Image (tube, helix red, strand yellow):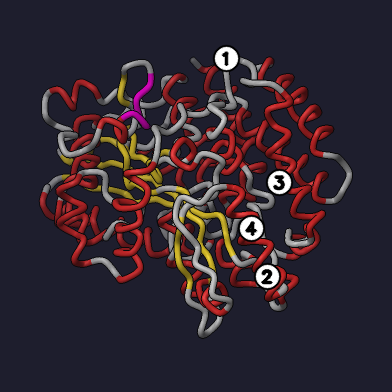
Amino acid sequence: MKRTYALLLAGALAASAALTACGGGSSSASDGGSSSETTAAAADSASSDTTAAASDSGSSEGGKNLVCYWWGNQVRNERTAAALELYEQNNPGVSIDPQFADWSGYWDKLATLAAGNSMPDVLQMDYMYVDQYARSGLLVDLTPYIENGTLDCSQISENTMASGTIDGGVYAICAGINSPALIYDKTLTDSIGLTIKDNMTMDEFFDYSREIYEKTGVKTDISYGVVNSYSEYFMRSFDIVPFGDKKMNGTAEDWIPFFDQYVKGLDEGWLIDPSIFAEISLGSIEQQPLVYGSSPETRSWCSFANSNQLEAPINVAPEGMELAITTWPAYDPVKSDYLKSAMLFSIGAGSDNEEEAVKILNFLINDIDANKIMLGERGVPAPTNVAEAIAPLLSETDQKVTTFINDVVTPNCSPINPPQPDGASEVYDLLNRVVEEVCYRQRTAEDAANYFFEEANKIMATK
């Protein structure tokens, strides 16, 4: 088991650097972060040291001391800490140490804790990592607690439960539902009489991009530098789940259309120049060309994000810019789109207070008062009764997102892909580099597809 921890530590540390672009800073299309920017000061204020505090969790003088660890921004940190305080008030003798970090720092610290067999009692988990951590024996199978009623999942749909289920065991519970979302400048599209439709096809997206560029000079950003989720979404239209057992599914030829969209945009002039991204933080919602660009050639009319990220660009958009939300484009919109657990909660293996940790998890998921404090910051609450209870309290933006999830995505989507296996982060790091080479005209679409597929298979073969 120690060897497993060491391997996980090495892999996570390597992956964190690759994932910083798609999850670091404030919020991104990868991590499903929400409206406010994460700050180092916020992370430092949680406690003196994550590793030391986690190892100190347990029972002392008849009380129960537990650690709850998550990544997030200032809003999430404050709301989650307040909810945990409510649990302590309702459960005398229980003390919860709230700890948090930004996206990349979170996984570095969690890998260290895993290597030292000191997992937090309650922790936030991402869909990209849940399979890896569960199979390494680092997460508790929650099935017995669901069966005995300690953890109530009766109000959560089967599709949503599937996101934390691995080989029949339940290792994570959805902390909030979101979906891929294209955030766009409605003020701009209205100014040229263009109506953006939901569930658009790729051809319609290309037509929109051409028309906007021709009439306004504003260009299009196709998820540059953070193509992880978008590439999976794109390939789902062709019934391809990219990752197989130690190999990539499909063929190199299947990837030509993915790279060709960048070539098409460059050839026709409407794709934003890759040099624009050299001076901004890739993956930062606040620095997307949608709201950050200072001239038509440095602006994009849209941004590939997640549904629970709408508020962040609204908060930093130039005065007079109205932003709206729709679905990502796809060759087959129903096949491609999906509902996703924006993030999940798990219980760390080896907890001295495992049952109490499950009760805390149940509280965060199901308690109405707790969720009135957190207000769906991690996404639409998974239990339907909780989502309905807090809906009237949500901001206008959050209510728009909830309507988008319920009325636009839910009736027009398919089950999400299985959790990504070990090696996926390295493959996506490779894919982002190859897309960059295509955008700098260093590779054709066909050459990029052949090179990517061959190198990706080499990576997966070693896992």
Does the image show residue 124? no
Residue 218 point in image, percent of width and height: 69, 71
Tell me what residue is drawn at x 19 percent, y 55 percent: 370
Which callout, 1 or 2, points to the residue nearer the camera?
2
Residue 182 point in image, percent of width and height: 51, 57
Residue furthest to the right in view is: 442
Q: Which region shows up in magenta?
A: 162-166
Kindly identify the amino acid type of the residue bearing the numbered disc 2.
Arg
Locate residue 376 relative to residue 207 in the image: left or right: left
Residue bearing mark 3: 261
Tell me what residue is drawn at x 73 percent, y 25 percent: 252
Q: Is residue 405 above or below residue 136?
A: below
Residue bearing mark 2: 299
Locate residue 57 relative to residue 70 in the image: left or right: left
Look at the image and say whether residue 65 sits in the magenta stretch: no
Which callout, 1 or 4, points to the residue nearer the camera?
4
Q: CA distance from mark 3 to mark 1?
A: 28 Å
Residue bearing mark 4: 207
Which callout, 3 or 4, points to the residue nearer the camera?
4
Mark 2 and 3 residues: CB-CB less than 8 Å, in contact? no
Residue 431 point in image, percent of width and height: 71, 37
Residue bearing mark 1: 245
Which callout, 2 or 3, points to the residue nearer the camera?
3
- Mark 3: secondary structure: helix
